[in-house]
Amino acid sequence: MRRVITYGTFDLLHYGHINILRRAKQKGDYLIVGLSTDEFNWESKGKKCFFDYEKRKHLLEAVRYVDLVIPEENWDQKTADVQLYKVDTFVIGDDWKGKFDYLKDYCEVVYFLRTPEISTTEIKEKLK
Ligand code: C2G
């Protein structure tokens, strides 16, 4: 069984998120999502989520491509996660290109093109 992992905030879940989750799942049979906790978002990413962790987790667990959601509490847990969950492939959008190449010592690292013209920030702006 090929295991894939990706991480993110996934607030106001939109088709850009679904696109990367679909492509991540195509890389294997089992997809784990490291979902940024409210504290991690606020303290380390400066993001105030519209939906709290439990609601964002509930939404992600309803996505057909997602098999497991785990909390992402800090920037440094990825190596341990990849080893603990025996991950074969790490996937993330190319806005992070190069940032997680250190994981190549443990698994395949894939940066997918982001879906253009959609972002949570954009959604919030348009709703104002
Ligand atoms: N994404 C995408 N296309 C968009 C928007 C987002 O492909 N239009 C992808 C991002 O590249 C990322 C995932 O969807 O791979 C989740 O995006 P965010 O929720 O913005 O996550 P981010 O803040 O980038 O957190 O440790 C890694 C971080 O937790 C990633």
Image (cartoon, grey):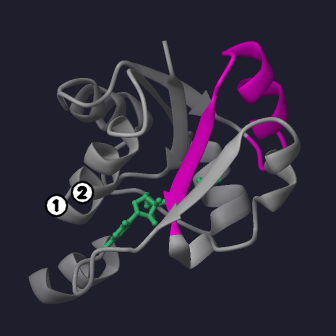
Mark 1, residue position:
15
Q: From this view, report whether residue 100 is shown above or below residue 71.
A: below
Residue 64: horizontal and vertical position, in percent? 17, 27
Mark 2, residue position:
19
Instruction: Using the image as rendered, state which of residue 89 and residue 35 is in the foreground.
Output: 89
Q: Residue at x 42, y 29 (%)?
A: 28
Q: From this view, report whether residue 2 is shown above or below residue 27.
A: above
Q: Which residues are magenta?
A: 74-93
Residue 54: horizontal and vertical position, in percent? 37, 28
Res 100 → quadrant = bottom right
Left or right, 104 with reference to 119: right
* Residue labelled 2 has its Cβ within 8 Å of some atom of ligand 1: yes
Tell me the number on the disc at residue 26: none
Q: Residue at x 25, y 65 (%)?
A: 16
Q: Callout 2: helix, strand or loop?
A: helix
Q: State which quarter of the image contains the C terminus.
A: bottom left
Q: What whole-number distance in Å separates the C-alpha atoms at marks 1 and 2?
A: 6 Å
Crowd around label 1: few <14 · some 14–19 · many ≥20 (10 Å):
few
